[in-house]
Image (tube, rainbow, N blue to C red):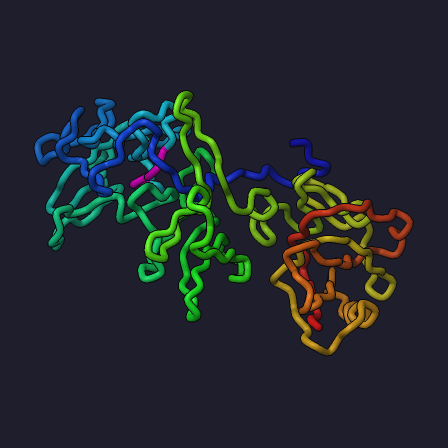
Amino acid sequence: MDLLAPIRTIQNPKYPNITEPIPEMPRPSSTKESCGGSVSSTLSITEPLELSKNSTLVSPNKLFELGFFQSQTKWYLGKRWKQDTDKTILWVANRNVPLLESYGVLKFMENNLVILNESRDLIWSRNLSGSVTRYVWQSFDHPTDTLLPGMKLDPVEPSKHLYSWVTSDDTSAGDLWLEITNYPDGIIAIYVMNYIMDTWNGFLFNENIPQQQLELNNGAMRGLRYTHVGPRDNVWNLSWSIGADACYWGGIHETCGSYSVCSKNALCHCIQGVSEMLEGGCITRTPMKCEEDIFEELQKMKLPTNGEHTNGSIYFVEDCEKVSFENCDCKSFGLVESRKSQCIGGQDLYIRAAASDNEKKLVPMEGYTWHFQCSPVSEN
């Protein structure tokens, strides 16, 4: 992608997603996965899983394969579909604490399932005691970034979230995460947010959504990104997703930085006539002088959510502009009509600029704006 004024490299996260089994393969007789009784190898007290031996554990139905994998210079314990030629990782045990050397072992130790490094330091562990079920522990109860058939996110278990990878190579929990919230009126909402987003960035669904797009199980949502593997070529295909553009996924004001605009056509660029690129970021073209400044208009923008709000007392753009002029720290303002949808068409945003830059008119653009130091917004 050719950026008009790149500010920093935008790393595309590995989004939370839902998968279905590879076609022409039987679904498991139980939705639970067990490492014991593997066809290719067995995890036992006397026979651990070692990275150096390049061995894996295969489930009895030959659907899943568990083993160590390398991403960049680090090593992780992960799970994938056995027949997936792309070896797409579906679950990662030590996603936030990787092995830094090509040595690792998965073993039982004192009622715990653990991963140890070469120095015998504990990298990851799960307690196996106290279970009264057939399975003492299973990855199906602890999804990381992918929901598999049999897994679910449930409003009654808020501890279960899906966290994106930071990038396609970094398994660490990223800023994007998915949870299911059960509203008092019974509506189930799915949220895709980072830590600074507000809850209004959610999407509401119900059980009338076509089955091929979204699966629901007793009111539990299963999915953000629905993918499947082709029956002949074993290629991953995206069937459905939410928030496909990078501006949305980047967060409210983390995608591009200050005095910049994010749009689908040119992901990050400075605001022409207001800011310019310097040392990897956007800065104002001309120092502002407060009382001599002007406000330039940007149309069809997504307004920042971290601004100050003035409710009901301002009804016209001219009034809002006057208030903003009196506050020299205010860099932008917008007027929000409460009766108008904020999701369709966007809003007009007025950016503070030096009067000497007035002849350098803004280039018409459509997209999202993300970060300004102050953004008072009036709601009428």
Is there any visible trace of residue 365 in the rendered image?
yes
Is 71 positioned to the left or the right of 247 in the image?
A: left
Say left or right for 163 vs 352: left
Q: Tell me which segment is drawn in magenta.
A: 89-94
Q: Residue at x 32, y 27 (%)?
A: 24
Image location of residue 370, percent across then percent down: 65, 53
Residue at image location 13% in from the left, 42% down from the top: 109
Answer with the quarter of the image where residue 290 lies: bottom right
Residue in the foreground of this view, choosing between 205 and 18 = 205
* Image height of 12 relative to 126, above or below: above
- Where residue 175 appears, as percent x and y from the top left, is 48, 49
Q: Which quarter of the rendered picture does the N terminus lie within?
A: top right
Residue at x-position 14% and y-position 33%: 43
Q: Residue at x 34, y 52 (%)?
A: 217
Left or right, residue 106 beside residue 351 = left
Quadrant placement of the C terminus: bottom right
Extreme residue toward the left, this view: 46
In the image as oriented, which residue stretches furthest toward the right? Answer: 359
Magenta part, dominant SS: loop
Residue 138 rendering spot, x and y as whole percentages: 22, 44
Q: How many marks?
A: 0
- Asked if the magenta segment contains residue 28, the reply would be no
Image x and y of residue 282, in percent? 71, 46
In the rendered view, tell whether residue 278 sits above or below residue 334.
above
Q: Is residue 90 magenta?
A: yes
Please say whether residue 376 is visible from this viewpoint: no
